[in-house]
């Protein structure tokens, strides 16, 4: 009996999946949207950028020393140097905020006096931005100090020594990636799910199914199977793009990643299912979807780590369903944890899965 | 012919304070076409949907092929075929795929081509429902209601909104289904349709059945009361003219 019921579920899930892949609009939004999202946020959060200054460098001097100075200056990572701009253009750019300062090497820069090259570096800054200017000056001072020390040997009494410490060496993208996956799954699970399902209610095609001897759990299961499959495809797609385009550094094992994705997707889709099953139409589904998904997006460490939040809030966010999903993905992807090491996350996800599927079963309506 | 396959006893449905179906009782005999007639809002659809196990029964009882509907909705759904009043099917699936899907819900192996042939849609097997005309859609709906080889087929206003050719075509289809031994229960507000198709009709108004008999008996009864049509009956009417001019062939 149950075998037959499950066969029915399977044939429905197959039909739903076929249907999904023929729906151009759905395909577009389901697969392209997460990718666009990945590109946008990957570029914002993904750059491993330290502090840097954009400056225009205008060299009016012809001396060999000045040419050498310019070459060395450009090699440094601190400055993004624009050359071959005239002063007026540079000034305009400074005014627009495209440049942080203008550096000018005057004609006499690098002239040799008493066997030592000498000269003044002129910097211009926007007087409206004193803080930036003083930082820029301090950095330039250090640069010049380095140059000076080549000519005047002194041994300063106090020195600073900076030592690197070995860390996991995560790039910003590595860290953000798990959040991006979690976010895409959530928006797919809740928004695209409730949208599609309520429109089937509206047209009456769900009601046509109600005529047949199928039970709500069969429809819920078949829909979930279809959606989870699509969710996993999306994650795979995002992962491939992450690897290829963003040089993602995978530290975990693929089996844990896959299994965890299946578990997490199952849980998140439960929320979409509950909303879609309950709502009579899109007007009911949309506000509820927002109400449920927005707190998750902002409190679950999707965009910034939860440890930046007030401690009180942190205690609550742990129990929000998306938090263990994002945490778990992050632990697998960036810290190389296996599924067996994710006990706390799996317990919370498991509890939510049970709760939400019971709820969606209880609140389900055919029309 | 006289065995009752559907037994409806004192059926009631209330929405709030409004009683939509009020103490309705009737039997449907095996193999007949049974019509429920009545104006809009008479309670026809609600009555059907209670029999079909789609709406909770507030009072009274329905048995179908000996099975109590209220306590065995699942078994009932296995045994019947239903065409809903305004039905809709999933988009992006072909007729064939939809029939397979519905068959799967009944644990039945279906032969989509055979079913589609029966409703004259064999050449549209690979089309999607939204490309069909109104009449084709209704016929597909009937085909989808036949996937489980039902004992009783319920058709809720099957010809509403169809052009005269499509209606005639659907009438033939219903007669063919009856010939296969399937009991048909339909609702309609076209009297000529009821007169042509139905072995017996129940006339419903305001949630009650106010008459139940064969069309002929109902007419005779009325005539016996001394009824006379105000206008002399013409030998043909405008519909006959229309069909004579445009032919019976389906336009789709």
Image (cartoon, coloured by chain):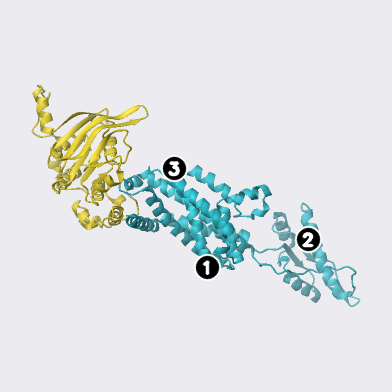
Chain colours: A cyan, B yellow
> Residue B129's spot in the image, x, y percent?
30, 51
Left or right, B95 with respect to A83, comes to left
What residue is shown with label 2? A136
Residue A279: mark: 3
Q: Separation of disc 2 and disc 1 at Cα?
A: 46 Å
Q: What chain is tagged by disc 1? A: A
> Residue B29's spot in the image, x, y percent?
16, 39
Q: Residues within 10 Å of mark 2 (few under 14, many from 20)?
A: many
Q: Separation of disc 2 and disc 3 at Cα?
A: 58 Å
Q: Earlier in the sequence, mark 2 or mark 1?
A: 2
Query: Looking at the image, which is closer to me, A314 or A140?
Result: A314
Residue A177 showing in the rendered view:
no
Left or right, B69 with respect to A275, comes to left
Relative height, residue A251 to residue A129 (above, below) = below
Q: Quadrant of the N terminus of chain A?
A: bottom left
Q: What chain is tagged by disc 2? A: A
Query: Looking at the image, which is closer to me, A138 or A305?
Result: A305
Q: What chain is tagged by disc 3? A: A
Asked if labels 3 and 2 touch by Cβ distance under 8 angstroms, the answer is: no
Relative height, residue B208 to residue A210 (above, below) = above
Q: Quadrant of the C terminus of chain A?
A: top left
Q: In what element is the residue under mark 1?
A: helix
What residue is shown with label 1? A254
């Amino acid at each position: 009996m149950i075998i037959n019921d499950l066969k029915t579920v399977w044939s429905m899930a197959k039909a739903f999946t076929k249907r999904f892949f023929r729906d151009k609009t759905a395909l577009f939004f389901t697969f392209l949207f997460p990718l666009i999202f990945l590109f946008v946020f990957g570029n914002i959060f993904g750059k491993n950028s330290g502090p840097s200054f954009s400056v225009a460098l205008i060299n009016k001097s012809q001396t060999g020393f000045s040419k050498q100075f310019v070459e060395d200056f450009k090699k440094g990572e601190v400055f993004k140097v624009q050359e071959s701009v005239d002063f007026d253009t540079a000034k305009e750019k400074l005014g627009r905020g495209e440049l942080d300062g203008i550096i000018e090497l005057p004609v006499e820069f690098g002239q040799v006096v008493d066997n030592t090259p000498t000269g003044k570096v002129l910097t211009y800054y926007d007087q409206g931005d004193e803080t930036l200017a003083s930082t820029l000056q301090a950095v330039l001072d250090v640069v010049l100090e380095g140059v000076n020390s080549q000519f005047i040997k002194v041994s300063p009494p106090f020195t600073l020594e900076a030592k690197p410490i070995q860390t996991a060496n995560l790039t910003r993208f590595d860290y953000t990636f798990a959040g991006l996956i979690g976010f895409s799954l959530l928006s797919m699970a809740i928004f695209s799910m409730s949208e599609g399902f309520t429109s089937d209610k509206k047209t009456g095609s769900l009601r046509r199914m109600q005529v047949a001897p199928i039970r709500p759990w069969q429809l819920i299961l078949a829909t979930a199977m279809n959606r989870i499959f699509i969710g996993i495809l999306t994650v795979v797609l995002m992962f491939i793009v992450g690897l290829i385009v963003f040089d993602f550094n995978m530290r975990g094992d693929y089996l844990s990643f896959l299994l965890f994705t299946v578990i997490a997707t199952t849980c998140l889709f439960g929320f979409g299912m509950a909303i879609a099953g309950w709502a009579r139409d899109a007007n009911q589904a949309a506000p509820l979807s927002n109400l449920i998904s927005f707190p998750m997006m902002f409190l679950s460490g999707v965009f910034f780590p939860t440890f930046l939040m007030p401690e009180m809030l942190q205690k609550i966010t742990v129990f929000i369903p998306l938090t263990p999903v994002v945490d778990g993905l992050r632990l697998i992807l960036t810290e190389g944890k296996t599924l067996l090491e994710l006990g706390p996350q799996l317990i919370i996800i498991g509890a939510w899965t049970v709760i939400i599927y019971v709820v969606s079963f209880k609140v389900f309506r055919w029309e | 012919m006289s065995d009752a396959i559907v037994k409806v006893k004192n059926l009631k449905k209330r929405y709030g304070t409004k009683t939509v179906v009020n103490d309705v009782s009737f039997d449907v005999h095996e193999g007949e076409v049974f019509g429920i007639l009545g104006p809009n809002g008479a309670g026809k659809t609600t009555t059907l949907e209670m029999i079909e196990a789609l709406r909770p029964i507030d009072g009274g009882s329905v048995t179908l092929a000996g099975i109590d509907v209220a306590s065995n909705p699942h078994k009932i759904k296995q045994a019947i075929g239903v065409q809903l009043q305004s039905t809709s099917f999933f988009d992006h699936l072909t007729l064939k795929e939809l029939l397979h899907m519905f068959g799967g819900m009944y644990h039945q192996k279906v032969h989509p081509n055979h079913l589609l042939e029966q409703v004259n849609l064999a050449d549209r097997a690979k089309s999607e429902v939204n490309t069909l005309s109104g009449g084709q859609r209704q016929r597909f709906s009937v085909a989808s209601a036949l996937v489980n080889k039902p004992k009783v087929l319920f058709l809720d206003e099957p010809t509403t909104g169809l052009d005269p050719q499509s209606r005639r075509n659907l009438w033939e289809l219903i007669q063919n289904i009856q010939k296969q031994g399937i009991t048909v229960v339909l609702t309609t507000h076209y009297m000529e349709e009821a007169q042509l198709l139905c072995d017996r009709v129940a006339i419903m108004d305001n949630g009650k059945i106010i008459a139940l008999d064969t069309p002929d008996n109902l007419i005779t009864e009325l005539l016996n009361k001394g009824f006379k049509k105000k206008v002399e009956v013409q030998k043909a009417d405008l519909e006959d003219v229309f069909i004579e001019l445009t032919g019976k062939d389906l336009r789709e």
